[in-house]
Amino acid sequence: MQPADGVFVYGDLSSGGANMKSFRTINPVFILAAAVMTAAPFIGLAWRVHEWLGW
């Protein structure tokens, strides 16, 4: 992964850019899955606090 004009790309910059993909072009489903995986522990903790406090 190498910076190119402020956007991190993966691939070989010397190959003419044919195989490079910007993180801006990653599938939105992947971004959504990453967000869910990040938020899941916090949602579980909030639910557990909700049960403990009896709200």
Image (tube, rainbow, N blue to C red):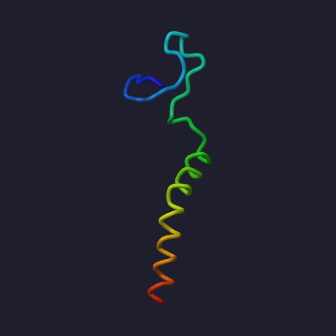
Q: Quadrant of residue 11?
A: top right
Q: Is residue 32 left or right of residue 5?
A: right
Q: Is residue 8 above or below residue 39?
A: above
Residue 18 horizontal/vertical position (percent): 59, 16
**How many numbered markers are drawn?**
0
Q: Is residue 30 above or below residue 42?
A: above
Residue 42 horizontal/vertical position (percent): 47, 65
Taking depth in this image into account, of 15 and 37 the one nearest to the observer is: 37
* x 54%, y 16%: residue: 17
Residue 14 horizontal/vertical position (percent): 50, 10
Q: Is residue 40 above or below residue 27?
A: below
* x 47%, y 73%: residue: 46
Residue most extreme to the front: 52
* x 55%, y 47%: residue: 31
* x 54%, y 11%: residue: 16
Q: Is residue 12 above or below residue 22?
A: above
Residue most extreme to the left: 6
Residue most extreme to the bottom: 54
Taking depth in this image into account, of 3 and 37 the one nearest to the observer is: 37
Residue 29 horizontal/vertical position (percent): 62, 48
